[in-house]
Amino acid sequence: MTGARSMVDSEESPAKPGWISRSRATGVALVPAASIAGRTLVTVVAIMTFLASLAAGGAVLISQTSRDWRSAVSREATIQVRPVPGRDIEADVREAVRIAAGAPGVESAQPLSKHDSEALLEPWLGQGAALDDIPVPRMIVVKLASRRTVDFAALRDQLLKSIPTAALDDHRMWSERLADMANVLVAITLVLLALLVTAMALAVSFATHGAMAGNREIIEVLHFVGASDGFIARQFQRRFLSLGLRGGMIGAAGACFVFLAAGLLSRRLIATPSGEQLEALFGSFSLGVVGYAAVVAIALVSAALCGQTSRVIVFRRLRNLS
Amino acid sequence: MVRFENVGLRYGAGPEVLQDLTFSIEPGSFQFLTGPSGAGKTTLMRLLLLSLKPTRGLISLFGTDSSKLDKDEITSIRRRIGVVFQDFRLLDHLTTYENVALPLRVQNRREDSYRQEVVELLNWVGLGDRMQVYPEVLSGGEKQRAAIARALIVRPDLLLADEPTGNVDPTMARRLIRLFVELQRSGTSVVVATHDLGLMDQFDGAKRLVLAGGRLHIYE
């Protein structure tokens, strides 16, 4: 048709206007980028990613903290020396410390001073209680290098032989209870995470269906002008993957911001009693590499879900067209 | 080029909407497809475009039995067919230029290789100064010409136009049909579905395929 005149109005037309030489034709997306449905999808993905990331981060924090609890409890044992008439409690304490410190696997044995013992009892007895009149047992904190190398039965026997009023508590009961509680907490968090991820998958899938509803004509036109099924699917998959990534990154960034802000806040509050409680329960709010990797993975899963759902819908529509 | 032998089509368990269609479309021929509303013109066009499968009979396109084609072969056959839809089906987020270039773009061709061709075709159909505007600002006639240009850009062996003059005034309709005749003279087989008897009367040389009661009557 080179050099042909207009068939309709028979007017001479320029062969190639200059402004067309930089046409957007190859750059412009075949699937429209900005649409209300697209923005809604980004919002849904961002919100669901944010919630799922909070749940995942929470699970990681609780898991890390429970591990810290267990580790702290399991690396400690306590020797209690009861005061009885006729025995020199200070000498008994010194002997117990010597025996404990010499046992294999023990890192150190440190007796609590009288003042420390009184401070421990203060919450129950109040300030200014006449502790001298009460037979308060003396405590020895035994730090363990490794729980596995300590023979608690032998240590207990040795202590009882030398000091009949000494009692060794290896914290096993507490440790086991704490482990059970921590395991239940982690399991609950994982169940919550699984529920949220399922809800996220469903919400993202429905939102993608909604956003795809307005693109029916594009699929048909591309099909009838000779686009292969794979080409059409790729156009939609790329577009929806990009929308999903945008939403996922917004949600993940929001969740990371929450964890970073909580970490900063907890560090500021660390000197206060409530800060100590928070740290005891949730650690330092530091997600660590695993936590941030989980957040990024959730964002990527959301985006992949958008892309894959759009691909499935395209192929379903194309099947109906053929 | 196209051969239908005893083709029948029914939807689900319903009655046959098209029965015993037997006809052929020769290379470089021009035919009107007509009939009352609901006679099955669009359905027959969809059979020609391989977007429907017949429930019986044989459809042969470009020498190949359509029932033996796989997806890729159907796509390559469809690239030899230009389609003009009754409702234009231009994509609103693409400019006139981008809409017309679409059939080439979906073949993964580089823009450099077809830009000149698209510009010339747009000039040819009188849309040289409307290349960078979006369909929403085009008039009905301009949209129709853009849709026709999109069908022609691949230099199809077969052009299917479904009620291409349904949205334009009589003068524009005659001009568009003249454009199709010009195409036919350059070797393209043209099938124009229309119910405009007056328009057909102005082009006596064309074969008439008349659909009525699900059957096809041919008038040479």
Image (tube, coloured by chain):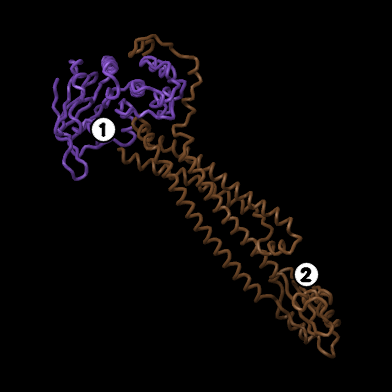
Chain colours: A brown, B purple
Q: Which mark is residue A230?
A: none
Between the residue at mark 1 and the residue at mark 2, the CA separation in whole angstroms equals 85 Å
Q: Which mark is residue A107?
A: 2
Quadrant of res A175: bottom right
Instruction: Specify the amino acid type for callout 2.
Output: Glu
Circle 2 chain: A
Q: Quadrant of the N terminus of chain B?
A: top left
Helix, strand or loop under label 1: helix
Tell me where residue B194 appears, x and y as whole percent.
22, 25
Left or right for A319, reference A262: left
Q: Which residue is located at x 66 percent, y 51 percent? A: A260
Q: Which residue is located at x 44 percent, y 34 percent? A: A31
B53 w.r.t. B107: above or below: below
| Pick the front one: B34 or A296 | B34
Tell me where residue A83 appears, x and y as whole percent.
81, 85
Instruction: Specify the amino acid type for callout 1.
Output: Arg
